[in-house]
Amino acid sequence: MDKEELAPHIAEISRVLGKKADEEQIARELATYLNLYRLSLEPAKRAVVRKLGGDPNELSQGTRKKISEVSGNEQNVDLLVKVISANRKEIEQEGQKRTIIYGLMADETGTLPYTAWDAERFPLEKGQVLLVRNAYSKEWNGKPQLNLGARARIEAHPQDSMYLPEGMDISMTSPRVVKIAELQEGMSGVTVTAKVLRVESRKVETQEGIRTVYSGVLVDETGSVQFSSWHDFELKADDVLRIKGAYVRSWRGIPQLSFGERAIVEKVQGQLQNYVGLGNPRVREIDQLEKVGGAFDVLVRGIVVDIKKGSGLIQRCPQCNRLVQNKLCRLHGKVEGHHDLRIKAVVDDGTGTLTVVLNKEITERLVGITLEQALKMAKEAMDPEAVLEKVEECMLAKPIEVRGNVIKDDYGLMMIASEASLSIPEVREEATRLLAEMEGAL
């Protein structure tokens, strides 16, 4: 090992020994154990510390890693990093208030979120270059996060001792200000400004015991999203909030905003009038829904380009309500199914396609026949496909507006519609409605 490679190890030994030896003496002793006695590095370091009157147990137990090598749930992690951001926050833990620091660290291999659980012991500031020892990692939001706990130590290095590669993507270092329509699974550290449409609390059982989670719906001018808060921010309906440090997870195929005690939630004053009337669903284009992987309570307008098999008159399992084919339920085997009506339509809005499932009530209204009439039609024709032909006659190539939640899976986008209409509002009518909403807010 050359002098440059040995420098951090000499510095570590010097830290353990304090004033018992200077770095020149440490370097000579270390070279002796490495080159003369042929010890490997770690035993050599321990031997030097022991010989010069120090405690070898105070040497780091960790393994020096690069950020790209850190995974979740590791102990004794050592990293040489640059502090990209450092945010202070007061939290309450076991009845005691304490200040933590959180943010991002980086090296030449990437960035890593961190939390320093004692701001006095770890006075981290943006721009510092630090050797972090005996930290531990945990997986949070599907990604590793570094924690500086009771056993961790930090050593300051010159700021010019680390340069991040030019052009390195450190976009995570800045808050990502996004609209609700832009939220997609996997996002973290996002900032969203929105109005609380509704909120409720419930108890859930977690690995840490029973916790209270606050959930509801947030809206902005681009759409609405369900949220979960794992901390009591005293949220109320009609509050307009700026939420910093939230993340996005997919729940039942729909992106959902989540935030906990490390998030910063501020109530925005004086902007309420801009959020009046936002409870109505927003029209979204299918390619946008494809990009973000689904959405909560949206409108889609397009043309019905196909009616899928399994539409029209069908049978359902009396136990699980699944589709029955040839008197067989996938879950319960041979059953005597009950009749139902539905439509699985493919809608194209010019940007992409979406499969829309319409239930019995919507099907009856759009096609103009009841379930009883459909049964009679099939009986008279001696063919249930007669109902499907009626559905195709009424629906194919027709403009349609559908409302509901959109999920994305291996088969593409799908909406379980809560409302549907075979007419699309005229632009003038839509503008009049929006104007009425705004005037009502004044």
Image (tube, helix red, strand yellow):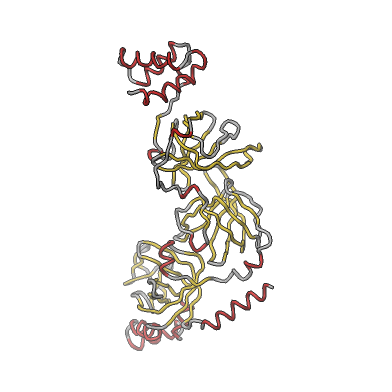
**285 over 38 or under it: above or below:** below
**9 over 427 or under it: above or below:** above
Quadrant where the C terminus sits is: bottom right
Answer with left or right where residue 60 lies relative to residue 204. left
| Image quadrant where residue 270 sits | bottom right
- Residue furthest front in the image: 160
Rendered location of residue 315, percent (x, y): 39, 74
Q: Residue visible at 40% across and 65% down?
A: 290
Camera-nearest residue between 403 and 159: 159
**27 over 102 or under it: above or below:** above
Answer with left or right where residue 243 lies relative to residue 368. right
Q: Residue visible at 52% across and 34% down?
A: 148
Q: Residue visible at 48% across and 34% down?
A: 159
Quadrant where the N terminus sits is: top left
Rendered location of residue 39, percent (x, y): 32, 17
Rendered location of residue 242, percent (x, y): 60, 56
Camera-nearest residue between 1 and 184: 1
Q: Residue visible at 44% across and 60% down?
A: 253
Camera-nearest residue between 242 and 346: 242
| Image quadrant where residue 399 sits | bottom left
Rendered location of residue 137, percent (x, y): 46, 37
